[in-house]
Image (tube, rainbow, N blue to C red):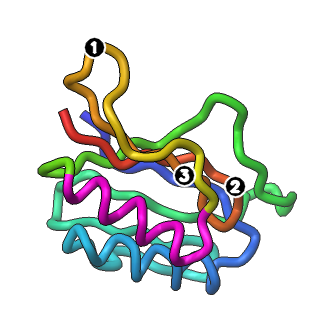
Amino acid sequence: MIGYVTIGTDNIEKSGHFYDKLLAELGAKRILENERLITWGNAKGSPMLGIIKPFNGGSAEPGNGNMTAIICEDKELVDRLHSKALSLGATNEGDPGPRGSGNFYGGYFRDLDGNKLVFFNM
């Protein structure tokens, strides 16, 4: 159902480097790129994650309550990616672990621009 999600950045080069290293762990590669936008995906037609400089020229600001969730094949991958994000300069928003009834396992972080993301497994 979801084609792509974009999150704002003020520094496309720095943010692009962060996501190149992080999303490579999922086998994702750059799909589309221009002076305002970079998207990553695994295959043509699969969902993509993108970073973008705001169209209105204003500064990128994370939305309160907005979050992008990236599915992982197992809990070990959640742990590894969460740790990698933090090693690349992300801030911790919740250590990996079970949430709710226990079948959801997620690790939360904020990227270099303050956007909130979660790696999860169900």
The type of residue carrying mark 1 is Ser
Whether the residues at callouts 1 and 3 have beta carbons within 8 Å, the answer is no
Residue visible at 71% across and 46% down in the picture: 62
Q: Are marks 2 and 1 in contact (CB under 8 Å)?
A: no
Please state which of the two labelled residues, at mark 3 or mark 2, is closer to the viewer.
3
Q: Which residue is mark 2?
A: 114
Above or below, comparing residue 14 to residue 38 in the picture: below
Residue displayed at 25% across by 46% down: 71
| Residue at which label 3 appears | 109
Task: Give the Cα separation between the discs numbered 3 and 2.
Answer: 9 Å
Q: Is residue 83 left or right of residue 14?
A: left
- At x 77% / y 57%, what residue is drawn? 60
Observer-nearest of 86 and 30 = 86
The region drawn magenta spans 76-90
Mark 1 Cα-neighbour bin, 10 Å: few <14, some 14–19, many ≥20? few
Query: Circle 1 sits on which residue?
Result: 101
Label 1 sits on a secondary structure element that is: loop
Indicate the secondary structure of the residue bearing disc 2.
loop
Location of residue 113 (image quadrant): bottom right
Of the image marks 2 and 1, the number of the one nearer the N terminus: 1
Q: Position of residue 33 (x, y in %)?
A: 46, 79
Residue 77, how many percent across, how many down?
Answer: 22, 59
Q: Earlier in the sequence, mark 1 or mark 3?
A: 1
User: Mark 3 Cα within 10 Å, few/some/many (few <14, many 20+)?
Assistant: many
Disc 2 marks a residue whose amino acid type is Gly
- Left or right: residue 21 versus residue 8 is left
